[in-house]
Image (cartoon, grey):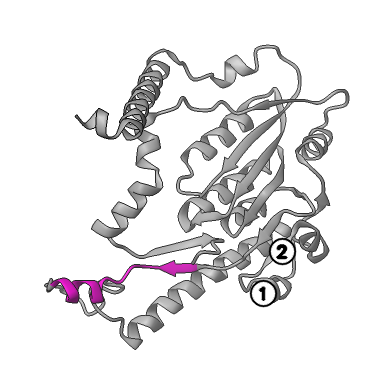
């Protein structure tokens, strides 16, 4: 009866079901038969190469980037490394960890950061650890600052008649609670925390870029810059694309002839990881487990 009354809707439902089933089935096949390419497999042809590591999207974890940096650093065939950044930034901890690993790597091999569409906030933090930075003239970068955010459902709970009960052993144990208003003392504590993390950002940029601390402080107010502006400010060394960055890295690494590049292997696709990292999951998690976030993140929607 439903198919007769709503033929178009019925067709859409059936078609959607088939597509979803096919997508899940294909993903399962890929996960079962695909094998991650190792660094040894990628470098079998031999010769001197530039290793390319891609950092895309929000920075939520440092594990894969650090693994790739370490693998390229320890491989004698890789003479220099390019880290290609297309990221608005992300969590403080992972950004700092990647920056530290880049700083360790530059003691052994040259590292060049190549900026794509956006390399802002934590994305710029990571780039500042490299020996040099290449950006497009229109790359969005900068946004040197810290943002803390949390959800407050106090009014919503009042409307639905829900009364939260909190038992705590310290005055500030539930600081940033989503079920009550924040006190002035709590605001001051969080502002001080944000200022400390911001200072860490500024100091690392000054050290990584060999810039005067006061100069970095003067532009570390969260504003964004084009790649061209960033170059004039000393935040970027050259204007160019990924190929320019590869060429620069290769010459710095001592490669004389034609420069070949090899990308770090991508991990095989995981449908579970895709679902886990989806926006729907993030929204649901915010509603069921609200918490405070401290990020090096450029996000116009905040």
**Residue 105 in view in this figure:** yes
Q: Is residue 8 above or below residue 123?
A: above
289 horizontally vs 168: left or right: right
Asked whether residue 274 is drawn in magenta, I would say: no
Vertical placement of 111 versus 152: above or below?
A: above
Residue ID at (61%, 51%)? 126
Quadrant occupied by the N terminus: top left
Helix, strand or loop at mark 1: helix
Tell me residue 287's x, y (percent).
27, 59
Viewer-proximal residue, 183 or 151? Answer: 151
Does residue 283 appear to the left or right of 81 in the view shown? Answer: left
Image location (x, y in percent) of residue 76:
68, 24
Q: Identify the magenta region.
A: 147-160
Which mark is first along the chain, 2 or 1? 1
The residue tagged 2 is 225
Tell which residue pokes out farthest to the right in this image.
Answer: 257
Q: Residue at x 51, y 75 (%)?
A: 195
Q: Nearer the viewer, residue 194 or 101?
A: 194
Which residue is rendered at x = 64% and y = 41% of the image? 105
Question: Which circle marks residue 207 in the picture?
Answer: none
Q: Is residue 152 magenta?
A: yes
Camera-near label (1 vs 2) is 2
Is residue 22 rendered to the left or right of residue 234?
left
Say which residue label 1 marks.
Answer: 217
Q: Residue at coordinates 12% horizontally, 73% vertically from top-left? A: 161
The residues bearing labels 1 and 2 have C-alpha atoms spaced at a distance of 15 Å
Residue 3 placement (x, y as % from top left):
26, 28
Q: Secondary structure at mark 2?
A: strand
């Amino acid at each position: 009866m439903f198919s007769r009354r709503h033929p178009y809707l019925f067709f859409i439902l059936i078609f959607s079901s088939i597509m979803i089933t096919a997508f899940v089935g294909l993903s399962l096949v890929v996960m079962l038969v695909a094998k991650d390419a190792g660094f040894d497999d990628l470098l079998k042809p031999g010769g001197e190469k530039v290793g390319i590591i891609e950092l895309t999207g929000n920075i939520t974890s440092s594990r894969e980037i650090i693994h790739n940096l370490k693998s390229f650093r320890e491989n004698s065939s890789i003479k220099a490394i390019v880290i290609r950044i297309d990221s608005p930034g992300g969590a403080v901890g992972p950004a700092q960890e990647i920056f530290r690993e880049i700083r360790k790597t530059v003691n052994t091999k040259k590292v060049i950061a190549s900026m794509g569409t956006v390399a802002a906030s934590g994305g710029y933090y990571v780039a500042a650890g490299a020996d040099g930075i290449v950006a497009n003239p229109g790359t969005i970068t900068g946004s040197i600052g810290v943002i803390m955010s949390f959800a407050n459902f106090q009014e919503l709970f009042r409307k639905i008649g829900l009364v939260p009960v909190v038992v705590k052993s310290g005055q500030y144990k539930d600081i940033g609670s989503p079920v009550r208003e924040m006190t002035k003392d709590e605001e001051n504590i969080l502002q001080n925390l944000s200022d400390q993390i911001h200072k860490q950002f500024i100091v690392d940029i000054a050290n990584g870029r060999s810039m005067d601390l006061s100069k970095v402080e003067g532009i570390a107010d969260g504003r964004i810059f084009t790649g061209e502006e960033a170059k004039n400010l000393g935040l970027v060394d050259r204007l160019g694309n990924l190929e320019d960055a590869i060429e620069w890295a290769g010459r710095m690494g001592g490669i004389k002839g034609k420069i070949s590049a090899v990308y770090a292997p991508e991990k095989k696709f995981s449908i579970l990881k895709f679902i886990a990292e989806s926006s729907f999951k993030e929204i649901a998690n915010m509603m069921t487990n609200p918490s405070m976030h401290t990020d090096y993140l450029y996000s116009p929607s905040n």
